[in-house]
Amino acid sequence: MAVGAGAPEQVADRLHSAAVTLLRRLRREDAGLAIGPARTSTLAVLVFAGPKTMGELAAIEQVRPPTMSRIVAALEADLLALRESDPDDRRAQRVRATTLGRRVAYRDRERRVGVLTERLRAHSAEEIALLDRAAELIERLAR
């Protein structure tokens, strides 16, 4: 198939650029947070995906284990996360969000969703429906 309008290569390139740009804009909302983007992202993983080992967190966040250790230590110092023994492997530790950590993560997500909601209000019902369908397709691509 030749690369042209609507070709998978072109759509992939545009989708990648749009996703990166949108995430960067949303990250600007995190500028006022005291914990910074790396800790915000790790905390979101713990809240929305559940407790993880240090290795799992490092892989998900695409950082080296020593970096993740520093991020988790900072989350612990802020009382946003807690390390516990893994019930399946006593040598391993799992990290989980605290009640305060969950509150912070939900508040941050609500703020970002609010920003997107306001941007969507400037669009027609048809465009919003199209974006809803696109979100469904993106979710399938991500699986």
Image (cartoon, rainbow, N blue to C red):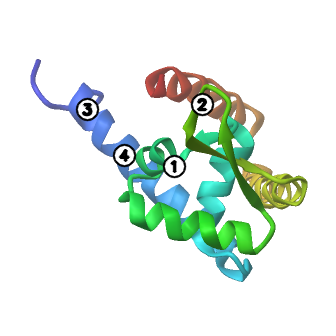
Label 4 – label 2 distance at C-alpha: 14 Å
Q: Which disc is residue 54 wearing?
A: 1
Kindly identify which residue carries mark 4.
16
Cβ–Cβ below 8 Å for labels 4 and 1? Answer: no
Name the residue rendered at 46%, 44% in the picture.
Answer: 60
Decide which of 122, 115 is in the foreground and name it. 115
Query: Which is nearer the N-term, disc 4 or disc 1?
Result: 4
Identify the residue under disc 2: 135
Q: Seen in the image, is 142 located left or right of residue 99?
A: left
Q: CA distance from mark 4 to mark 1?
A: 28 Å
At horizontal 31% and vertical 36% (from top left) the residue drawn is 12
Point out residue 16 in the picture as x, y percentages from the top left corner.
Answer: 36, 46
- Give the amino acid at mark 3: Ala
Dot 1: what SS? helix
- Are dots 1 and 3 in contact, CB under 8 Å? no
Is residue 8 rendered to the left or right of residue 73?
Answer: left
Sequence order check: which comes first, mark 3 or mark 4?
Answer: 3
In the displayed image of the protein, which residue is found farthest to the front?
90
Q: Residues within 10 Å of mark 4 (few under 14, many from 20)?
A: few
Query: Where residue 76 sits in the image (x, y, percent)?
Result: 72, 67
Q: Nearer the viewer, mark 3 or mark 2?
A: 2
Whichever of callouts 2 and 1 sits on the residue coming sooner in the sequence is 1
> Alpha-carbon distance for marks 2 and 1?
30 Å
What residue is pinned by disc 3? 5
